[in-house]
């Protein structure tokens, strides 16, 4: 009996029992070795057990295995905060809030939004098909979290969570999306807008850069906070350290997590810009947990930053992403799919969830793990994936998606034939 409560039940019998991993590959209890095309859960940007990160964590475990940040401090945390402040867009970071995981960090950021809210503010704007965590408080802010649905709901703290449709790169009418955005700010008077520059859980949808720049301008005009959830899109994943940098905007709050320690320890946080930094002078504002920014986790993050920045992995993600997307477009262009994404965060949207599930399973049978979110197949490999492994990932993805589409097309044809037979039989019955 498996007593572990997790999301394993969503996948049933094809759940993977992982026993070891290294580089871009995982090994399972049944003896298989598989190429991991989703970098853990988008949090292993340097591959598994990167030697420099492992060495840094091991050394710190032998020096300072634990220290909390309540009336104490420690050098790894201070150094990490300083490094992140230097990396922040245009040096806009004034302070850094510590957290343990992405959900925790979003909670911290939204706690600051509640403190920021003025009497005239009535809402928090959030994007359709967003995902920001699974906690009770955050379920009101995302369409894709457990229980997340509805256009408008009362959020914790008395503000309305109002969903708006963002302009997505390659989709729809930008001018109309900009008009709707202006109207949303005027009508709902938001204290903040919470965005993911790349909606990875929605199939790697990329928010249009021009739309995001208008968001930043409206936030300044309405005294609202621009909150960028970069938990999945940060750490160089999209070709810039933070995805919001592509639009040239400076969020007031930038939330990071997942890949910051390269998957070696839990750590997350919020980069706080100069406008909301005054809120941290209030001694009553508290956020932090027992294991927030423990020394080994900070050591992992510092080592991971050294690798990502020192080896030019942001530029590598950008160039490999362009080539990979083009290959998918070339080889799947005649099929009913949409290829989305930026850098090495790529989604292929299929006609339905069942087709995507079939594609994911077909790839696993061929030795490659692909991500799947609803109707989309996700390719989110480590940023330092070997070229040969990336070629294999793309080849298997294309083959598996084609097979899934062919199978779903055959199934649809059978359904149509059966429906015609049933209709014909019904007409005959009526005629007699």
Image (cartoon, rainbow, N blue to C red):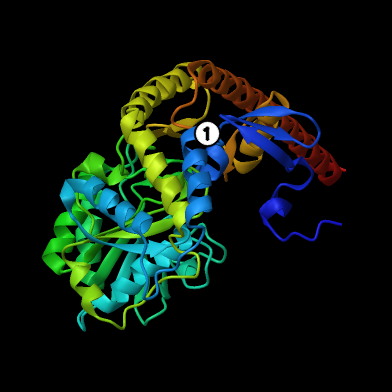
The structure residue drawn at horizontal position 49% and vertical position 61%, both measured from the top left corner, is: 133
Residue 249 in the image: state x and y as whole percent: 19, 48
Describe residue 390's horizontal placement relative to residue 105 as left or right. Answer: right
Q: Quadrant of the C terminus?
A: top right
- Secondary structure at badge 1 equals loop
Residue 127 in the image: state x and y as whole percent: 37, 57
The structure residue drawn at horizontal position 79% and vertical position 37%, both measured from the top left corner, is: 29
The residue lying toward the viewer, choosing from 154 and 301, is 301
Q: Is residue 228 above or below residue 235?
A: below
Q: Is residue 376 visible?
A: no
| Residue extending furthest toward the front | 63
The structure residue drawn at horizontal position 22% and vertical position 72%, both measured from the top left corner, is: 189
Q: Is residue 198 visible?
A: yes
Q: Quadrant of residue 357?
A: top right
Describe residue 6's horizontal placement relative to residue 287 as left or right. Answer: right
Describe residue 405's horizontal placement relative to residue 314 as left or right. Answer: right
Q: Which residue is mark 1?
A: 47
Q: Is residue 243 above or below residue 395?
A: below
Q: Would you call the spot at circle 1 few (<14 residues within 10 Å), some (14-19), or many (20 or more)?
A: many
Q: Quadrant of the N terminus?
A: bottom right
Residue 421 in the image: state x and y as whole percent: 80, 35
Q: Is residue 114 above or below residue 81?
A: below
The residue lying toward the viewer, choosing from 280 and 392, is 280
The structure residue drawn at horizontal position 62% and vertical position 20%, both measured from the top left corner, is: 399
């Amino acid at each position: 009996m498996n007593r572990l409560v997790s999301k394993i039940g969503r996948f049933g019998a094809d759940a993977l029992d992982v026993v070891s991993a290294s580089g871009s590959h995982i090994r399972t209890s049944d003896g298989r070795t598989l190429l991991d095309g989703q970098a853990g859960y988008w949090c292993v940007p340097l591959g598994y057990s990167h030697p420099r990160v492992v060495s840094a964590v091991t050394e710190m475990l032998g020096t300072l295995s634990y220290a909390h940040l309540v009336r104490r401090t420690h050098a790894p945390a201070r150094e990490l905060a300083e490094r992140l402040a230097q990396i922040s867009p245009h040096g806009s970071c004034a302070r850094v809030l510590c957290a343990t995981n992405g959900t925790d960090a979003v909670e911290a950021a939204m706690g600051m939004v509640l403190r920021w809210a003025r009497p005239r503010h009535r809402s928090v704007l959030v994007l359709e098909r967003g995902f920001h965590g699974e906690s009770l408080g955050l379920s009101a802010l995302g369409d894709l979290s457990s229980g997340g649905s509805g256009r408008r709901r009362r959020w914790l703290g008395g503000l309305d969570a109002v969903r708006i449709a963002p302009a997505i790169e390659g989709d729809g009418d930008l001018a109309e999306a900009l008009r709707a955005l202006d109207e949303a700010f005027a009508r709902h008077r938001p204290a903040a807008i919470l965005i993911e520059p790349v909606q990875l859980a929605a199939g790697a949808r990329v928010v249009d850069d021009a739309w995001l720049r208008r968001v930043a301008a409206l936030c300044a005009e309405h005294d609202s906070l621009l909150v960028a959830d970069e938990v999945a899109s940060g750490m160089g994943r999209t070709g810039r350290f933070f995805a919001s940098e592509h639009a040239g905007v400076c969020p007031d709050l930038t939330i990071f997590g997942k890949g910051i320690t390269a998957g070696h320890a839990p750590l997350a946080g919020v980069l706080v810009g100069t406008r909301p930094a005054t809120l941290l002078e209030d001694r009553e504002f508290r956020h932090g947990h027992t294991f927030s920014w423990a020394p080994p986790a900070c050591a992992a993050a510092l080592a991971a930053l050294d690798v990502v920045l020192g080896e030019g992995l942001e530029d590598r993600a950008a160039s490999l992403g362009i080539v990979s997307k083009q290959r998918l477009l070339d080889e799947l262009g005649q099929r009913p799919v949409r290829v989305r994404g930026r850098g090495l965060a790529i989604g292929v949207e299929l006609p339905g969830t069942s087709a995507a599930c079939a594609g994911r399973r077909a790839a696993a049978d061929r030795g490659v793990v692909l991500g799947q979110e609803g109707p989309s197949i996700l390719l989110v490999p480590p940023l330092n994936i070997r070229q040969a492994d990336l070629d294999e990932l793309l080849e298997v993805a294309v083959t598996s998606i084609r097979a899934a589409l062919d199978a779903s097309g055959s199934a649809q044809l059978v359904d149509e034939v059966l429906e015609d037979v049933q209709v014909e039989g019904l007409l005959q019955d009526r005629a007699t």
